[in-house]
Structure formats: structure tokens, C-alpha cells
Image: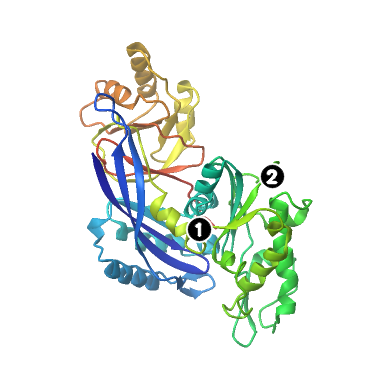
Amino acid sequence: MSERLCSVGLDVGTTSTQLIVSELVVENRASAFAVPELEIAQREIRYKSPVYFTPLLDESHVDGEKIREIVQEEYRKAGLQRQDVDTGAIIITGETSRKENARAVLDALSDFAGEFVVATAGPDLESVLAAKGAGAAAYSEQEGKTVLHMDIGGGTSNLALIRKGQIVNTGCLNVGGRLVKFGEDGIISYVSPVLSGLCNLKVGDRVTQEDLEPVADMLTQALEMAAGLREKTQLLDKLTTAEASGGFAPPQESVVLSFSGGVADCIGNDFPWPQFGDMGPILGQAIRRSRLCQGQFRLGSETIRATVIGAGCHSTQLSGSTVFYQNVQFPLKNVPVVNIRNPQDIGRELRKQEGTAILAMQGKAAPSYREVTALAEEILGQTQAPVLLCLEQDMAKALGQALAVRTPPQAQILCIDRVKVSAGSYLDIGAPVASALPVVVKTLVLEQ
């Protein structure tokens, strides 16, 4: 027995904006006499939009109305109605996520994705989506190799270290093709603030390819440092994004380098340097000449579309099938996660959090009735409604029932399991699919 979901992915990036529509097939992998075990068994892209340049009002503001018009037109071309959409992701990525009205743009777009939508931007999530969308995670799993994937866009490069198909570390650098932009006359119209102190280029200068090559070489050196191919200097620290969660440790083993993003198209192609009005072609060729491409390397199966394919096809996972929910209005969006190691710490951790949060706990495998009831009483002794729980172990239904009999009928309770989250994450939880709930784990980084 299978169920099909319509998923939309929209990526509003530094350089490009694009949309895909995909179909996800959900299947029960358990036997007829076992607890259902639902998995997304198949992902198939049904529609790809053209790649648009991201419309801007100015260097500080995304043109939300133009983006909305793009989405409306692409829904029409795809023959898609808002009510047809079951899941998906709208993400603002790269330098665009730092624009002053990024959150307003997300609010304006969120109603295009039906009952369940992710509205997020963050380097950790973007790194994961790009690595999956480019096929780097699948390649690592199939070949049994360690892969360092670099998604090099207009404003940032998102890194993902992958071992045997599992993403074990992520990072993000301020390295991209549109850190410098210029007109047809070669007059610079924009220099990213991240280059302050690193080069002498300024708005109004007339540049040539020779003027831009040293900047491209410098940015490439930072990527080499992140890959462990060059001794680390302060340059790497200066170009590491403030939003990245922790430092990115260069891999200690031999790796296959993998590339996606708009700049990846410039690694294997000799585009004229002024063609796109930025330094993307020059940066791509600098990477091709560098140590990054002297060993094993590959271009992703998708390059400029890697992130949007990851958003449309790989952002959703399913909870366990033995979940419990009562008086919950789906979808839940942007619910912050509070990690709990010891149930006795619930009250203290919740006092640090403003508003509703979901408690993430390990739980117990095959708990006894006494253990379930004791945990339910511990939770209720330290919380007020709503009670939202995310467990790693398969015990959500039993715990939810234990909570329900100890609270008023109108109490809002949600217990999901088989979902692992980390501190600083946010969850979107959609309406039930079969007997499971679709869940997106994400990092929300939209602040200035």
C-alpha cells in the first residue's frame, strides 16, 4: 500500500530563484502483522521552472512582489493549485537570507505551499539539501567513499562532509560568484561587505579579468583550507559565515571533492568572464586550476538546481507510525526544539524558552508500563499545555496515551518518535500521512 505526496521546492538564492514540483511515494515497509514502518520510497521530479535571476529592489531588499509573480506563473505552468501541495520547502539562501526584508518575503510566499511549508534559511540545512540534491550523498553511499561536497553559489559556499552516505559535518563560507558585480561596461556596481579589508575593489571602478583573478584566487584558497589542502590562515576565519553552527573541521582522510551551485557550471565550462555580470566564471576557472581539482573530484548530478531539488525532494522525513496527537491544529510551523537529557530538567530548560517549544528526548526502547507512566507524570509536573514531545525511541503512542488520561480532554498533546533533532533546530510538522506525520528538521537563521 502506497500513498503519493506532491512536494514543492522553492529556492530564493543570492543569484537565482527557481522552483520544482516533485512526487514522493510513501510506502509501508513492515510486514502485515507488524507495526507500520513508513518510508519515502521514491522521489520523482515532475516539473522544473526556468532559472530566474533573483529580483531585488536594491542591494538591501528582495523584491517580494516579483518573486510572488514568478511563483504564481510557475504554478500555472505546472498545472498546480495550492490545495494540491502536501509538503515542501521555501528557503531563502546565501546572501539573500541577510536582506532586510527576507522574513517579509517568506511570509508573502508561505501560502503558496498548501498545508505544509518550510520557510527557512540557514547554512546547515542548505548544506544538507544541496549535498542530497546534487547526488553527493547517494554517490558516497553507493561507492562507500568519503565526499566533501561544496555548493558554491552567488554569495556563499555550503560544505557537507559525507561518510558512507551520512552527512557528518556542515559548514559555510562567504565565497561566491556575486561578491563582486559589474555592468556591461565593466563598472563595478556592488562589492560585498565580506570582502572589506581583503581587496581594494570598490563601486565605480572599471575592472578587467586580470583585476578580478587575484580575488578569485584568494576565495579559492579559503576553499582549499576548508578541504584540508592548504594550511589554515586567518583568511578562512574571516570568510567563515557568522551563521554557521560551529567550526568546520577539514577532513582527516582522503576525500572525493564534489561541486554544485552556479559556480560549479563554470568549473567545466569556459564562459566569457563578463557574461553574467559577476566573477562567477573567473572563480570557476580558479577552482579548476586549484588543488581542489588535482585529486578525485566530480560535478554534482545537479549543479545550479541542487539546493532546490534538495528542498523539493529531500526536506521531508516521516515520524514513526505509532504517534499520538490530540487537539492539534496541523501544520505546526517553526516550533523551536529544547533538548532534554534528564526529564527532571524540563522545567528549568523551558524557563529559558519564550513561547511554545517541543521537548526532544531520547526516550526508552521497550519501556515498561511503570516507566511510561512515571515519565508522563514527570513531564506534566513541570509543563503547561500544550505538551509537545519528540522522541528518538519508539514510544510516542504509549506516552501520549499516558499523558492524555492525566489531563483534561481539551488539552493539546503531541508525541512523535523516530525523529532525531539537535539543539538549535526548529520543526515543521504536517498533517498525518497514512499513520505517520511528515516532519522537517531545520535551522532558522534570518536575523541580521
Which amino acid type is shown beneath numbered disc 2? Ser
Q: Is residue 117 visible?
A: no
Q: Residue at x 42, y 32 (%)?
A: 359
Picture layout, residue 382 above or below residue 2 = above
Circle 2 packing at 10 Å, graded few (<14), some (14-19), many (20+), is few
Q: CA distance from mark 2 to mark 1?
A: 21 Å
Q: How many marks?
A: 2
Q: Residue at x 50, y 37 (%)?
A: 422
Picture layout, residue 385 above or below residue 124 = above
Q: Residue furthest left?
A: 409
Q: Quadrant of the image for the N terminus? A: top left
Q: Residue at x 73, y 53 (%)?
A: 225
* SS under mark 2: loop
Q: Does the residue at mark 2 contact the one at mark 1 (Cβ under 8 Å)?
A: no
Q: Quadrant of the image for the C terminus? A: bottom right
Q: Position of residue 51 (x, y in %)?
A: 44, 70
**Residue highlighted by disc 1:** 301
* SS under mark 1: loop
Question: Between residues 448 and 9, which one lies in front from this camera angle?
Answer: 9
Q: With 405 as the anchor, is 258 left or right in this view? A: right
- Disc marking residue 254: 2
Which amino acid type is shown beneath numbered disc 1? Ser
Q: Residue furthest bottom?
A: 185
